Amino acid sequence: MFLLKIARLGHPIIRETAQSVSKEELNIQPLQTLIDSMVETMRDANGVGIAAPQVHVSKRIIVIEVSADNPRYPNRKAVPLTVIINPVIQSKSQTYETGWEGCLSVPDLRAQVPRSSAVQVSGLDRYGEPLEIDAEGFFARVIQHEVDHLEGNVFLDRLPDLKTVTHLREYH
Ligand code: ZN
């Protein structure tokens, strides 16, 4: 596995709609290596999630992991390493929570983003087995953030009020 270069906002791939991954593709080594490299890259950057377009691969793959001592997002509920291929948000709660988000592709900025407080997401695991996850709170937020990347959206697009955009050092 390798550390991958992270695409930033402004690179066209961040605004593309990502392509679905076939089961056949999942069975071949390059895709498994890509997933391992996404995990390494996310951890190296202290991210809590990463989507394949963020590493210049326009495919529908997201990786999420929240550790309790993550320096970018301290004191969030831990989420074990989760890989979702072709994720689809099947349902969203109609209740919303506003919380701080940043993005490895939008360095140094944070903003308060409203998100559904719970989601149900389906997809495949990295071995092609069907998967369904019920998530709430910060986990639900990260899922919505990462799935947005597959449609070419970033958290800034979700802001009702640009006045919450904050430089990371001022945030701290
Ligand atoms: Zn992001």
Image: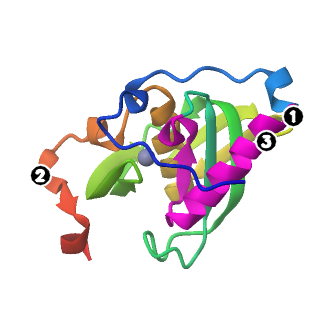
Q: CA distance from mark 3 to mark 2?
A: 41 Å
Say what amino acid the circle numbered 3 marks. Gln
In this view, the mark in front (3 or 2): 3
**Earlier residue among tags 1 and 3:** 3
Say what amino acid the circle numbered 2 marks. Lys
Circle 1 residue: 129
Say what amino acid the circle numbered 1 marks. Glu
Q: CA distance from mark 1 to mark 3?
A: 14 Å
Please say whether residue 63 is visible from this viewpoint.
Answer: yes
Of 5 and 82, which appears nearest the observer?
Answer: 5
On the image, the x and y values in percent for residue 22 come to: 77, 20
Residue at left 85%, top 31%? 28
> Mark 3 Cα within 10 Å, few/some/many (few <14, many 20+)?
some
Question: Do the residues under discs 3 and 2 have CB atoms within 8 angstroms?
Answer: no
Using the image, determine if residue 31 lies above or below residue 106: above
Q: Confirm whether the magenta stretch covers residue 154.
A: no
Q: Confirm whether the magenta stretch covers residue 33.
A: yes
Residue 137 numbered tag: none
Residue 32 numbered tag: 3
Q: Quadrant of residue 84?
A: top right
On the image, the x and y values in percent for residue 41 come to: 58, 57
Please say whether residue 131 is visible from this viewpoint.
Answer: no
Using the image, determine if residue 114 lies above or below residue 17: below
Question: What's the magenta region?
Answer: 28-56
Image-based side of 74 in relation to 32, left or right: left
Label 1 residue near ligand 1, CB within 8 Å: no
* Quarter of the image that includes the C terminus: bottom left
Indicate the secondary structure of the residue bearing disc 3: helix
Residue 163 numbered tag: 2
Name of the residue lying farthest toward the left: 163
Image-based side of 87 in relation to 92, left or right: right
Of 148 and 61, which appears nearest the observer?
Answer: 61
